[in-house]
Image (cartoon, grey):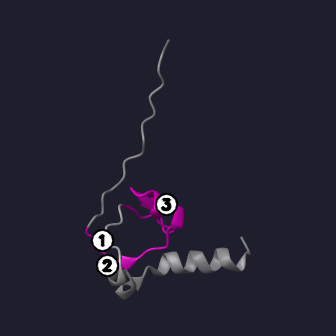
């Protein structure tokens, strides 16, 4: 019997959010915890929770992609 081992893609742990942007991610990904992937493709582990999040400027790429998806009625 052989065991298949899956190799997960490397996740860049961007704990400090050096770009200081608020990214759009799926809410279920936030609830599960761990690494998330934003609409713009940024991979990170969210660590800031609370009102401080709302003081960040939004990632323009995430906003553009979100608006495009919203207009497509997806």
Residue 69 colored magenta? no
The reply, left or right, for residue 55 in relation to residue 73 is left
Disc count in the image? 3
Taking 57 as reference, is 65 above or below it? above
Residue 20 is labelled as: 2
Look at the numbered discs 1 and 3 and tell me whether their residues touch, using CB distance below 8 Å: no
Residue bounds of the magenta highlight: 16-44
Q: Residue at x 41, y 58 (%)?
A: 33
The reply, left or right, for residue 37 in relation to residue 16 is right
Q: Is residue 26 visible?
A: no
Q: Position of residue 37 (x, y in %)?
A: 46, 61
In the rendered image, which quarter is residue 54 located in? bottom left
Name the element at disc 2: loop
Look at the numbered discs 1 and 2 and tell me whether their residues touch, using CB distance below 8 Å: yes
Q: Residue at x 44, y 60 (%)?
A: 36
Q: Residue at x 36, y 52 (%)?
A: 11
Q: What residue is pinned by disc 3?
A: 29
Q: Position of residue 15 (x, y in %)?
A: 28, 64
Q: What residue is pinned by disc 1?
A: 17
The Cα atoms of the two marked residues, 1 and 2, are separated by 5 Å
Q: Residue at x 49, y 73 (%)?
A: 24
- Local crowd size for mark 1, using a 10 Å CA cut-off: few (<14), some (14–19), many (≥20): some
């Amino acid at each position: 019997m052989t065991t298949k081992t899956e190799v997960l893609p490397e996740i860049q742990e961007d704990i400090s959010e050096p770009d200081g942007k608020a990214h759009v991610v799926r809410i279920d990904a936030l609830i599960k915890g761990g690494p998330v992937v934003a609409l713009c493709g940024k991979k990170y582990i969210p660590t800031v929770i609370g009102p401080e999040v709302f003081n960040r400027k939004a990632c323009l790429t995430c906003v553009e992609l979100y608006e495009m998806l919203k207009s497509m009625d997806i």
